[in-house]
Image (cartoon, rainbow, N blue to C red):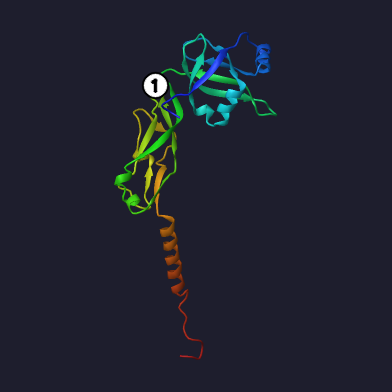
Amino acid sequence: MAGEIPDLEAQVRTGTGKGAARQARRDGMVPGIVFGGDNEPLPINIPFNKLLTRLRQGRFKATLFNLKVEGHDDVRVICRDVQRHVVKDLPTHIDLMRLKRTTKINLFINVEVKGEEECPGLTKGGVLTLVRPEVELVVTAADIPEYVTVDITGLEIGDSATISRVDLPEGAKPTIDRDFVVATISAPAGLAASDDDEDETAADEVPTTEMGPPDGEE
């Protein structure tokens, strides 16, 4: 998601309290509040259909948005809570937090691959599988990369590229505290099946026990 920060459009909500929130919902809006930073909390309304579309795209709470409110400067925000109807599971209220440039946040960042021309495993017919097309990183709001790159140079069939082979921007770190797999080079399906057949044949040719002649025979 990084790089091009998606816009989230909202309107200033006039009035506060439950009455104003109910009226917003009757008007096809989802009431919300923007807090944090050096400014006072700002009551807002977001069009219900647009918000629902964003929610259904997934990872709403891990996405950085450029909030656009008429009469106010654009500001980067991240969702801190979405309240939902207890029966219909539809959004009824949203809390957004303003971010300073130095704020640390968790975001999913796209992964790109380099070194394919220098990868012996691919030259031999191996198949590249990007196990994690995105990785979750802790980044600063001012330095969000568009993508990170995993280097598969020199990998053979059966090898894996872990997060330690990914070029991370300065100050960023994975949320998972282990050297997890990002990409693998596997054997092509035909070769893998052939290897399995050879293993089965070899197993059939090996006797399971060493038996002597029956009693009374030499």
For label 1, the SS is: loop
Question: Would residue 155 be seen by someone viewing this image from the given angle?
Answer: yes
In which image quadrant can residue 147 be found?
Answer: top left
Q: Residues within 10 Å of mark 1 (few under 14, many from 20)?
A: few
Q: Which residue is drawn at 68% across and 15% down?
A: 22
- Residue 218 point in image, percent of width and height: 45, 90
Q: Could you tell me the amino acid type at mark 1?
A: Ala
Is 77 drawn above or below residue 154 in the view shown?
above
**Toward the viewer: 107 or 70?**
70
- Residue 98 point in image, percent of width and height: 48, 17
Is 175 drawn above or below residue 85 in the view shown?
below
Question: Would residue 153 be seen by someone viewing this image from the given angle?
Answer: no
**Toward the viewer: 24 or 42?**
24
In which image quadrant can residue 195 be found?
Answer: bottom left
Q: Residue at x 43, y 21 (%)?
A: 103
In this image, 43 relative to 105: left or right?
right
Q: Mark 1 points at which residue?
A: 142
- Residue 119 point in image, percent of width and height: 31, 47
